[in-house]
Image: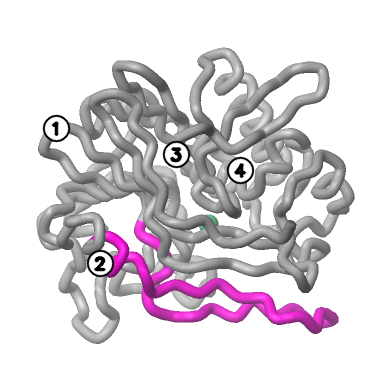
């Protein structure tokens, strides 16, 4: 079976519902995504490639609904395609978005209903719907405050970052900068949602632990891109800022999720973003029952 970008999917944790809301998709050459070797992608029966042998990643946001709060974790790519062609590769690699607002609308959520955006990090595929480039300074979600770690803000908002294709655009930084709240380890920007420092992929990457009355979940952001990285934490993603720290962070996440029995939420995972991790003798990461 071939992998596909994940569809809209909800998981009720008890008093808190997580909904994966697609924006688009990401296709990458396995050998480019994992320059140190990618054989481990194929050892566990995980379906992560499309019919052309390209790695498939979902791209979207996680909507957290609790009480009367509507909170997004990350904000997609936006209505654009970012080509990812590398010298020496031939196949069509890209990140493409555009569907987030329409998919939110189908869930009954208007942009003005979103009262917070929790940012795992500031890469382009996580901030693309912050605001419209042609209406500089006008936020897409007019009532939202933006939560992120200070290290992440400092890494991208300082001088010399402009023009980094994988980073935020100037209008996005201006909108976030005017409305930002800083996360630290243990911050609870929304009741039941706790910030967990998970650096390595970027200098201030933050994951979120979500506690419902029946279940706990862990939204990994880009600390884990592909299910195979949970089973093989030493797979080295090309875009990791600090590869050795990223490997340690992935190992810690696998341990934590196993210890807590938490649902692992990988917003870049193909097919199923909600997964059950079983650390048994032969570890597995299977779709979580919904
Ligand atoms: Zn990403």
Q: Find disc 1 in the rendering and name its residue.
A: 67
Q: Secondary structure at mark 3?
A: strand
Q: Quadrant of residue 250?
A: top right
Q: In the image shown, does 289 or 259 lie closer to the viewer?
A: 289
Q: Is residue 156 visible?
A: no
- Nearest to N terminus: mark 1 or mark 4: 1
Quadrant of the frame with the C terminus? top left
Q: Residue shown at 78%/62% (left/top)?
A: 30
44 is higher (above) or lower (below) than 62:
above
Q: Quadrant of the N terminus?
A: bottom right
Q: Which residues fall within the magenta stretch? A: 75-104
Q: Is residue 105 left or right of residue 119?
A: left
Gap between marks 1 and 4, in whole Å? 29 Å
What is the quadrant of residue 55 in the picture? bottom right
Spatial CA span between label 1 and label 3: 23 Å
Q: Provide the secondary structure element on which disc 4 rests.
A: loop
Taking 127 as reference, is 241 above or below it? above
Between discs 3 and 2, the one toward the N terminus: 2
Which label was assigned to residue 102? none
Q: Nearer the viewer, residue 277 or 90?
A: 277
Q: CA distance from mark 4 to mark 3?
A: 12 Å
Residue 43, x across and y down, in percent: 86, 42
| Residue in view at x 43 percent, y 80 percent | 80
Residue to which mark 4 is pinned: 224
């Amino acid at each position: 079976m071939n992998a596909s970008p994940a569809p809209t999917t909800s998981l009720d944790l008890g008093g808190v519902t997580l909904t994966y809301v697609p924006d688009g998709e990401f296709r990458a050459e396995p050998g480019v995504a994992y320059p140190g070797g990618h054989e481990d992608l194929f050892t566990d029966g995980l379906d992560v490639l499309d019919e052309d042998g390209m790695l498939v990643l979902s791209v979207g946001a996680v909507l957290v609904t609790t009480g009367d709060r509507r909170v997004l974790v990350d904000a997609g790519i936006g209505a654009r395609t970012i080509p990812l062609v590398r010298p020496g590769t031939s196949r069509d690699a890209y990140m493409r978005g555009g569907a987030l607002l329409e998919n939110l609308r189908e869930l009954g959520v208007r942009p003005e209903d979103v009262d917070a955006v929790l940012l795992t990090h500031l890469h382009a595929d996580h901030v693309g719907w912050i605001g419209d480039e042609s209406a500089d300074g006008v936020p897409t979600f007019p009532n939202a405050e933006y939560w992120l770690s200070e290290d992440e803000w400092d890494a991208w908002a300082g001088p010399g970052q402009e023009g980094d294709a994988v980073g935020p655009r100037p209008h996005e930084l201006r909108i976030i900068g005017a409305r930002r709240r800083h996360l630290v380890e243990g911050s609870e920007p929304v009741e039941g949602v706790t910030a967990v420092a998970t650096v390595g992929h970027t200098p201030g990457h933050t994951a979120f632990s979500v506690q419902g009355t029946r279940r706990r979940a862990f939204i990994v952001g880009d600390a884990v891109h592909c299910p195979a990285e949970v089973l093989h934490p030493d797979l080295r993603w090309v875009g990791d800022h600090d590869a050795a720290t990223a490997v340690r962070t992935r190992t810690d996440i696998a341990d934590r999720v196993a210890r807590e029995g938490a649902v692992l939420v990988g917003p870049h995972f193909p097919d199923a973003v909600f997964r059950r991790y079983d650390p048994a003798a032969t570890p597995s990461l299977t779709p979580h029952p919904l």
